[in-house]
Structures are given as C-alpha cells and as structure tokens.
Amino acid sequence: MRIGIDVDGVILDYEKVLRTYGDLYDFIELKKDGMINRNEHYLRNRYDWTEEERMNFINQYFMKLSKQAELMPGAKDVIHLLQKEGHELIVISARGATVAGMEDEAKEKFEREGMAFLKYYWKQVDKLEVAQKEKIDYMIDDNFDICKKLSENGIKTIYFRDKDMKKFENENVIEVSNWGEIYRVIKNRN
C-alpha cells in the first residue's frame, strides 16, 4: 500500500507547539485577546491579527518552533512497522512553503531518529496532484481542508484530528487521534 504522510501535526507535534506560542504571542506580545476561532487550523483564521502581525509571528517563530517540535507519540514505531510490512511511505508536506529551510530541519530530525521515507514532496500546499501522481492509497493529514479535497477526489484519507480542530462528517474520511489508531485503520483496510 502507498501511504502519503503529512509532517506537521502528524509526524511532528508542530501544530500544538505552534498554537501554544500563537496564543502567547497574541496575549503577551500583542497584548490582545485576538482569538476568533480556536477550531481553525490556519493562523489567519484563528486570530484577528493584521497581516504584519501574522508575518512577524511567522518570521520570528516558525523555525524556532520547528526545532522544538518532537515526534508524535508512537509515530516512529508505527512508521517502522508499516515499512517492515512492505508499505511505501511518502512524505507529502506543505513544510517549507512559508519559511525556507523548515524541510531541512525535518529531514535532519528524521535522520537523527533513524527514519527514512520512499520519497519526499515539500512545499505542497495543495497535495491532490502529488497524491494522484503517486497513486496514494491513504493520505494521513491533520488539515481539514486538505482531507476534504483529497477525499472528494477519491483518495482515502485518514484525518489526524486534534481535539480542538473541526470534526469531519464524511464517509470517505476516517478520523484518528493517535498513531495506534492509524495502524489499526491501515491493518483493518489492508
């Protein structure tokens, strides 16, 4: 089976780190209480920041937080199990599209952890074309909009949903909240 895997919020716990520091930046540095939608994935829809405030946060924090993000619990073990069972794992990530070098940080982290993937696609804001080209059987992603688009175009999608993110009501998407559930889904569908 060919499995596409997003990085941030799936392999690395970057999204939780990002939201934590986004809240601190909003409240302490900007002296606001600018949260407008806690269930929103994107900063521009989560806070009432100006474009200048958002870009300042991105430039000041994205790389720093990338270095801080740890592996999601169980990610390394399940990835190794899936590879041992013959599944082909392909990274398909938007990482690096906003801040250059973030993809290198992830690759270095994977190397330190003894993790490697069949292929890497970085800076993929719209993942549909790559997923179709690579004939992905399952795509694992934490972005509601990405999962929606992929599933509507016939790609089976595993939505790695943090408790605060939007819920899915789509029969083509399976929601999970940890890597044990991912393994169970793939084993039961294989």
Image (cartoon, rainbow, N blue to C red):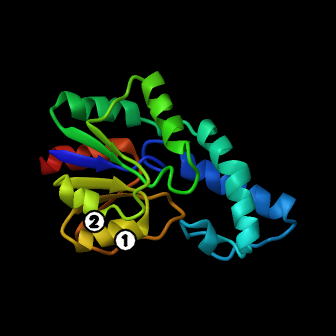
Q: Is residue 47 above or below residue 60?
A: below
Sequence-earlier tag: 1 or 2: 1
Residue 147 spot, x, y in % from top left: 34, 65
What residue sits 51% from the left and 50% below the top?
96
What residue sits 26% from the left and 63% below the top?
129
What is the crowding at mark 2: few (fewer than 14 residues within 10 Å), some, or many (at least 20)?
many
Label at residue 168: 1
The answer for how far apart the CA atoms under marks 1 and 2 are is 7 Å
Q: Relative to 117, is 73 on the left or the right?
A: right
Identify residue for label 2: 173
What residue sits 37% from the left and 28% below the top?
115
What residue sits 70% from the left and 49% below the top?
61
Closest to the observer: 163 or 105?
105
Describe the element under mark 1 as helix, strand or loop.
loop
Describe the element under mark 2 as helix, strand or loop.
strand
Residue 130 spot, x, y in % from top left: 27, 57
Residue 31 spot, x, y in % from top left: 87, 66
Q: Relative to 34, is 152 on the left or the right?
A: left
Asked whether residue 150 is in view, the answer is yes
Task: Please say if the residues under marks 1 and 2 sit with CB atoms less than 8 Å apart.
Answer: yes
Closest to the observer: 103 or 47?
103
